[in-house]
Image (cartoon, rainbow, N blue to C red):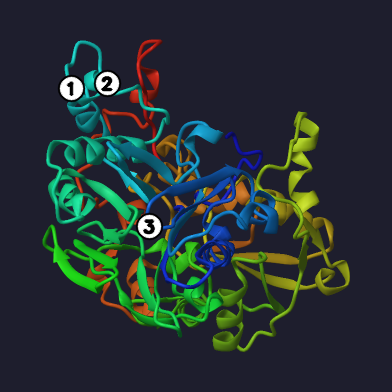
Amino acid sequence: MISADPDRKPGHACGVFGVYAPGQHVANLTYLGLYALQHRGQESAGIAVSDGSTITVSKDMGLVAQVFDERRLAPLQGHLSIGHVRYSTTGSSSWRNAQPIYRSVGDAGFALAHNGNLTNTVELAQQLGMLPGMPGITDQRDEIDSTTDSALVAEIIAAEYESELRSDGRDLVHALERVLPRLAGGFSFVLMDEAHLVGVRDPHGFWPLVLGRLPDGGWVLASESAALDIVEAHFVREVEPGEMIVIDATGLHGGIRFAEADPKLCLFEFVYFARPDTNLYGHSVHAARQRMGEALARQAPVHADMVMPVPESGIPAAQGYARASGVPYGDGLVKNRYVGRTFIQPSQKQRGQGVRVKLNPLVENIRGKRLVVVDDSIVRGTTTRQVVQMLREAGAVEVHFRVSSPPYKWPCSYGMDTGSRSELLAADMSVGEIRDFLGVDSLAYLELDRLTVATGASPDSFCTACLSGIYPVPVPFADSKHALEDLPAGASSTTSA
């Protein structure tokens, strides 16, 4: 998908959800969980359900509420289920890339839902024989029916599944034990076969995955704790980096290690991705964002008449800034909640008007005032520049822009869609140059050490690659995210999940 917003926020990682709850309508629970995770992906939604003998998958393009209704959920009967909402970090947004991905293996099968992005996709494709002249696994199997790295993982798991069928009913688990150490990059998986629900988190834990307990005894896996709340599940703990959890009729089997843990949660989960009512590392995301604003006020004070957010992502930090600075908090922009990321802007003039469709100024609150405008990040700067122009036209005397994260300078290869470095405003411009480009009276970004302190967690427990250029897992930048998408006609191809 090509976004119509030239300065869209970094694309969310996807959202995953899983539930093991015999006697309950697991498809309905998964629907609710995905609804709570809708902010993590708006392109497609899917649910897979097992009744103990058959796995049924239902998925389509669109939002959760567009894809599923009572008629479509009713046939999805079973005791365990997984679900997925997708945001494609690269490649096309199409039905065949919707998840969960299903693979049949002999008389059995499994389904997989993936949040993240692998960094050794080319190497895995070579193992699968997907590159010209390379013999591999797919020589013996049908062409992969998806263009995601998630499909690569499913294919490798299926091959291992077939090569070592066992009699203990845990074929998927044994296959994963062989496959997971071969994967590099960011991945939080929920998987299922006919009888088992499995949760997996990469050794760095780039993307969150939590475990919850239902009141009637079932188990839930979810990308965020807020998705546990909606199904009234009690938070138990986070899935540890490098850990696999298996849930079946005999109970919960945790602590299955496939790699040593080196926690590096994406710092942008605290800044922007996660819902404000989620907890990460045991800390409230909403409270952390308010502390970011407080830290920003102490770092970069300014004489002003009103602190206002760029809605909605800038609200908690703006509240914190106002509280710490003593400058009154107020609303200066109203957001149209019904304009999504796929809003069509067919002409240059309409593209220029895109911000005005999404945001409208409250002139009576703005006219004649010195404003502190707070947002969580600036990526490409085009939208921010238009917001500033709107505020000037509404009569603002001064506009001081404050950002509750450091300059965004480097692309992410673990699961965020940030484009290339050439597309990032701060990659080659100083803060002073960005200030002039935006047309603001002053500009300040929250310093990285202040940001990590505001989270309440250990500064060493985060990935800061997009802000610092320090990548916890080596990234083969020579292998573009589109490398496998450009295979010769007729060859299978993959892009990021």
**In x, y percent, where is residue 109?**
33, 43
Q: How many marks?
A: 3
Q: Are the residues flagged by discs 3 and 2 in contact, CB closer than 8 Å? A: no
Q: Identify whether 342 is placed above or below 250.
A: above
Q: Residues within 10 Å of mark 1 (few under 14, many from 20)?
A: some
Q: From the viewer's perspective, is residue 368 above or below residue 168?
A: below
Residue carrying label 2: 130
Q: Position of residue 350 (x, y in %)?
A: 79, 36
Q: Is residue 58 above or below residue 391?
A: above
Name which residue lies at 42% across and 31% down: 146
Which amino acid lies under the numbered mark 1 shown in the image of this protein? Gly
Of callouts 3 and 1, which one flags the residue occurring earlier in the amino acid sequence? Answer: 3
Q: Position of residue 139 (x, y in %)?
A: 23, 18
Residue 309 in view here: yes
Lower sequence index among marks 3 and 2? 3
Quarter of the rendering containing residue 204: bottom left
| Proximity of marks 2 and 1: CB atoms separated by less than 8 Å | yes
Residue 52's disc is 3
**Which is more toward the observer, 461 or 85?**
85
- Residue type (three-letter) at the residue carrying disc 2: Met
The answer to which of 438 and 94 lies nearer the viewer is: 94
Q: Amino acid at mark 3?
A: Gly
Mark 1 sits on what residue? 136
Q: Most extreme residue toward the right, as rendered?
A: 364
Residue plotted at (28% across, 28% down): 479
Q: Residues within 10 Å of mark 3 (few under 14, many from 20)?
A: few
